[in-house]
Image (spheres, rainbow, N blue to C red):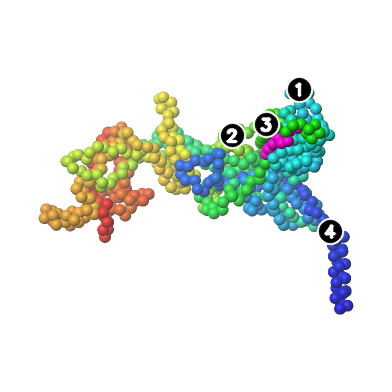
Amino acid sequence: MRRFLLLLNGLIAFGITLGQAPLAAREVVNASEPKKLAVTIYRDPDRATGDRVNPDFPRGFAMISETRNVTLPAGASTIRFGGVAEGMVAVSAIVTGLPGGTIEKNRNADLLSPAALVDGTLGNRVRITRTNPGTGTASAEDAIIRTRADGGLVLQTAEGFEAVRCAGLPEKLTFERVPAGLSAQPVFSIDTHDPAGGTYQITLTYLSWGFDWQAHYVGTLFNSGVKGETALQLLSWLTVVNDNGQSFPSAELLVVAGRLNVDSDYQALSDPPSGQPLRLRCYPLGNTKRGDPVPTVQRAFALPSPAPMALEDGGIIMVTASRQRRENIAMASSIAVVAGEEQLGDLKLFRVPEPMNVAANGMKQVAFLNKEKVRGEFFYVVRCTPDNIYHEANDLGDYDSTELMLLMKNEKDRGLGVSLPMGGFTLFEPGTAGTQLVAELDMRDYAVGQDVELSLGESNLLFAQCARVREKGPGEQRDGLANDRANDQDSEKADKWTKMRTTLSNANNVPVKIRIQLGQSGEYDVRWPRKQTMLKDGFIVVELTIAANSEKTFNWKLRSPRGHSGNY
């Protein structure tokens, strides 16, 4: 029992000691403005070829790295990072360079706004200024805010209690200071502990929603001087979109091309802070001292947020101790800087060599590709199927149009040899009447070494006819096998192969290259006279050249693959 009493007395004494020396509250310190910024933008992973960036709702994201200085006291402290992106995904944030690491991190939910300013000044003095609209005379007096900003604003003055904006006079509220904890820009904070204290250079890295980028290529054709080839000057622009309300001045800008597997919903995770407006309802009208009558009509005034903080009809809320300087930022600017290409795993990273201003709610264009002489060539695509039937001798019906293609091999010795992210493509050609638009099209991603094949639309100079000679197509001849055997000594061969005929008409004054698609891979067996077929992009094709201003006919055969029992 004696030991128990001694232990109890010891615990009581220890408790009294804790009560006499409570843990010190954390000191709040502000990190400096970023000394170094890097913004790496990833395009919308769900955007397909032909889709464009929506500048009003970009669905890509960025990794932002900010290097700042901070001076910490000895012991526990809270570091505030002001001006982070409003689309910040707080759970992704990492802070490096602190001796005590990160104990806890928080995203401040409220921005400086008219409603937050009123709520933070509840019970404190402000100054209200009224202007007589007839004489222009302004009178000011002190007042105390007595209600929160949730439907009405009531002040206590020397004359009693008054509802703001209900006297019919232009009114202005002036606040002596910004309440603690409010900021005009989003704030991210962390708790840390440093036994000694000191000044450190730290880096904050996080993901942010509300960014995107896309490429657009501009090509100008000219004579290459090599027979059968053309050449073009190829310039490409990166269009970068920042939908956040924060700018990133003098930042290292990088963009990543390729499809990234993203499972997280960054838009939902970002949960941007909000600035609430001040909505004033005039009830009651007048003040308690004079006993003015109460009308039956309510008037509502909505206050936009967060800046400028001004009421409709001339009312103003002003903070005298802090004013935010706002810059006029152009929505788009062009800079003649070429980005360099780097490898990032299976993705491609393009780094802009000079610091860029990634403007708030803005777009920027940066040149990332400038090739003076890219060698290419034109060719035509003809698509043949056994669906058309030849009925009369030497008559295959009307001619079909063909597709004109531009081929560029993505190789260094052909003037390219760089990764080409998907985007729009605009092609021009100089002429006697000046430079004219040739085509506008969409281009998918192309890696180094691939053939870049761009469709320029239907041709008016090369036409084709393609049809089967027999009535029955491949797979249909088995039903008439007995009749074929009676009339055809080579009945087995006739049963397996369908005769086809293709006529090509070239109205160009130069020879042209033609690629004829003869069906998808595995769909048919094909025999083309004196020409080897090949596989290209999943199709059985044959490539040949037709002389200038000429017409040529080819007889060839196809059949269903051996063992295939279906019909076509």
Out of 44 and 349, give the one closest to the viewer: 44
Crowding around mark 2 (Cα neighbors within 10 Å: few <14, some 14 to 19, many 20+) is few
Q: Which residue lies furthest to the top in this view?
A: 135
Q: What element carries label 2?
A: loop
Q: Name the residue under label 4.
A: 22
Type of residue at label 2? Met
Task: Kindly identify which numbered label has been placed on residue 136.
Answer: 1
Residues at circles 1 and 3 in contact by the CB criterion of under 8 Å: no
Q: Quadrant of residue 142?
A: top right
Residue segment shown in magenta = 277-286
- Structural distance between the alpha carbons of marks 4 and 3: 49 Å
- Structural distance between the alpha carbons of marks 2 and 3: 28 Å
Q: Residue 308: x percent and y percent?
A: 69, 34
Q: Considering only order in the chain, which callout, 1 or 2, is on the residue closer to the N terminus?
A: 1
Please report the residue visible at 32 percent of the width from the left and 39 percent of the height from the top: 402
Q: Name the residue under label 3.
A: 312
Crowding around mark 3 (Cα neighbors within 10 Å: few <14, some 14 to 19, many 20+) is some
- Structural distance between the alpha carbons of marks 2 and 1: 39 Å
- Number of the front mark, 1 or 4: 1
Q: Residue 290: x percent and y percent?
A: 80, 31
Q: Considering only order in the chain, which callout, 3 or 2, is on the residue closer to the N terminus?
A: 3
Residues at circles 2 and 3 in contact by the CB criterion of under 8 Å: no
Q: Residue 80: x percent and y percent?
A: 73, 48
Q: In which quarter of the image is residue 103?
A: bottom right
Task: Kindly identify which numbered label has been placed on residue 331.
Answer: 2
- Structural distance between the alpha carbons of marks 1 and 3: 18 Å
